[in-house]
Image: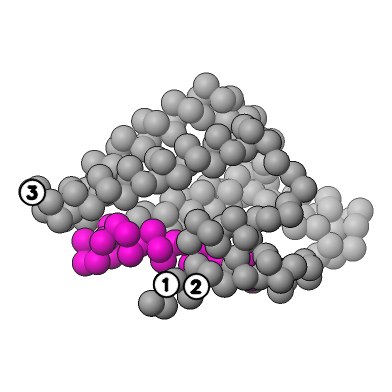
Amino acid sequence: VIFGVILATFGEYEFSIIGLVITLLGVLLSSIKGITTNQLLVGRLKLHPMVLLCWMSALSFIQCGSISYFNGEIDRFIHYASKLPRKQDLNKLIQQTSDSEDEGSRRIITFEFMIACVLTNGFLAFLLNYVSFTAIKKTSALSMTVAGNVKQALGIVLSIWLFGYAMTPMNGLGTAVPCTVFMK
């Protein structure tokens, strides 16, 4: 799989040490998460996936909330959200925009719609984690990692098809390697 990644990225024209360090750190943390999750689900404790998800969610919330606060994301979110129109102001806003523009040429995003999108995203992330933990309990962390690598390779193929990116034969071989490893 590592050989496939090397082939898939060979010839890329943008490289930075900070990008490499962040990538390696992400791989290390992902490996630790997979091993820890596997040990908690099938090891001595044999936790149910929902129990593990409840514990991990609280810790993740603290971690992400702290990083978001110190990075200024929460302030930017509040600032952006305060400028969005509310649902009760929607009819007035539609009338103003329809007077000045063609009907339907502008999409209006309300505060309530944005909150619904954030909550939907959170719910889908919850379902993804639950399914992931259940799959790790039934198979192994290694199986989920390999499946994740194949998903990444298929994502590359899909983006090449959608955006018309030219791929060299070496990049194509590198993208095919994780898929063939998964089939064995």
Q: Label 2 near label 1: C-beta < 8 Å?
A: yes
| Residue 179 image label | 2
Q: What residue type is labelled 1?
A: Phe
Question: What residue would you read off at disc 1?
Answer: 182
Circles 3 and 2, Cβ within 8 Å, touching? The answer is: no
Q: Name the residue under label 3.
A: 44
| C-alpha distance separating marks 1 and 3 | 29 Å
- Find the distance from the CA under tag 1 to the CA under tag 2: 5 Å
Q: Left or right: 104 with respect to 115? A: right
Image-based side of 174 in relation to 140, left or right = right
User: Which residue: 38% across, 77% down?
Assistant: 184
| Nearest-to-viewer mark from 3 and 2 | 2
Q: Is mark 3 on a helix, strand or loop?
A: loop
Chief secondary structure of the magenta portion = helix
Residue 109 in picture, x, y percent from top left:
67, 51
**Residue at the left extreme, as displayed:** 44
- What are the residue bounds of the magenta stretch? 133-157
Please say if 118 is above or below 102: above
Q: Does the magenta stretch include residue 149?
A: yes
> Where in the figure is residue 59, as x and y percent of width and height?
31, 35
Circle 2 crowding by C-alpha within 10 Å: few under 14, some 14–19, many from 20: many
Horizontal and vertical percent position of residue 172: 66, 70
Location of residue 58 (image quadrant): top left
